[in-house]
Image: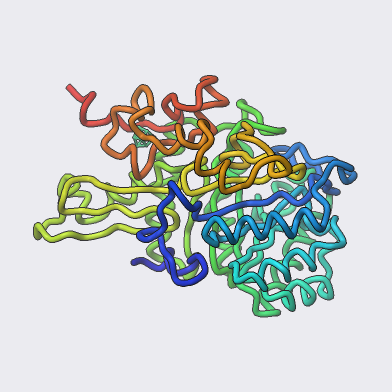
Amino acid sequence: MDRQATVYQPARGGSYLTVDFDLTPFTVAWEITRACALACVHCRAMAIPRRDPRELSTEEGFRVIDQIVEIGRPILVVTGGDPMMRRDVYDLLAYAVSRDLRVALSPSATALVTRRALEKVKNTGIHMIHVSLDGSEPSVHDAFRGVSGSYARTVQILKDVVDLGIPLQVGTTVSRRNVHDLPRIAERVSELGVTVWNVFFLVPTGRGQIADLISPEEHERVLNWLFDLSKTVPFHVRTTAAQHYRRVVIQRTQAGRHGGEAPSGATAYVTGAGYSFRMGEGPVGRGVNDGNGFCFISHIGDVYPSGFLQLSAGNVRDQSLVELYRSSSLFRALRDPSLLKGKCGNCEFRSVCGGSRARAYYLTGDYLESDPSCVYQPRASQP
Ligand code: SF4
């Protein structure tokens, strides 16, 4: 198992190899509010300045956490909007930790994230904090975030989190606006003592615009660059909404260069954040994708396959999360690679990759269609 796989493990010692995604997601993200003081140009949530009166209450939140325990104790990511806009955020975090969940918090970089607030967050016992950094300097980052001074505040928060000894994940959303700046952002990430760099690839939902998407060729170039970078830097490199990074990793490993077979004939694994690929018995693999090892609970309790694929399977106020994740037709379809269409449906990497179902949906109108951001030609369709 590689370094990335050691960072996120579900409670009770599970791993990608032991979690059955038909029964238990690897990760659940819960948007506890959509309220946020920022106005980011790519905001998935279309965040709003004030809290929605329909938000799940504190008591309802505790019951959601109970359901997350019941479904098999996946990793819980508490997100928003800005989760710090809820005064009960500390109670929700502490309760989730008390139920033996591994919990990460994703606050927005606003004046609410003081050193004192971070100390209170640390005292809840959470396992990681995620903070976004979309540029190596104020001109790029502040333009992304829609608020002047956001870069300086973000860097201060990053330093405070590291100083308090809380494992830190930095997230960067790649788009036309900052793709040129990635090497310098990586330098900042390295300087700051970050544990994980999670590189998000834009999905044109919420305020995200199709015009800001990088091309399929640029995706390929950036994914290969990330693979090279991951071998030299002191932090772990992860990707989000770039399932084809797994294909790149597999192709670039020694076993991958031998056509999906381990060179010695022995079984070998390529395992990273949210995927595992077995060599030696053909290209067998599995990977987290929207609705497949992942689900998202909105601020009003709707259950989506991910924050980027905002199609509701139902609401936790009416049905249990367990039932919606395991049995809804939407989630079941997303877990069946034989239903994939086009190039992704023909691809030998479809189980471990499968393409971004969210990007496919927003660019083609069909969540089972091919992910248009991938340049790969599956073997089955090669001349
Ligand atoms: S064609 Fe689809 S399944 Fe194959 S590598 Fe590309 S995105 Fe992944």
Residue furthest toward the left?
Answer: 264
Horizontal relation, residue 27 to residue 61: left or right: left
Q: Quadrant of ligand 1?
A: top left
The residue drawn where x is 33% and y is 28% is 345
Q: Is 111 on the left or on the right of 309, as rendered? A: right
Query: What is the x, y in percent for residue 221?
Result: 41, 41
Vertical comparison of 215 with 283: above or below? above
Q: How many marks?
A: 0
Task: Where is residue 170? Give x, y as percent.
Answer: 61, 60
Is residue 353 toward the left or the right of residue 28 in the image?
A: left
- The quarter of the picture where the N terminus appears is bottom left
Q: Looking at the picture, tell me which residue is in the foreground, 374 or 300.
A: 300
The quadrant in which the C terminus is found is: top left
Query: Residue 308, position in %: x, y?
Result: 61, 38
* Residue 137: quadrant of the picture: bottom right
Tell me residue 107's x, y (percent): 74, 58
Residue at the spot 9% in from the left edge and 60% down from the top edge: 264
Q: Residue at x 21, y 56 (%)?
A: 254
106 or 133, nearer to the observer: 106
Residue 115 sits in quarter? bottom right
Q: Is residue 28 above or below residue 169?
A: above
* Residue 179 visible in rendering: no
Answer yes or no: is residue 361 visible.
yes
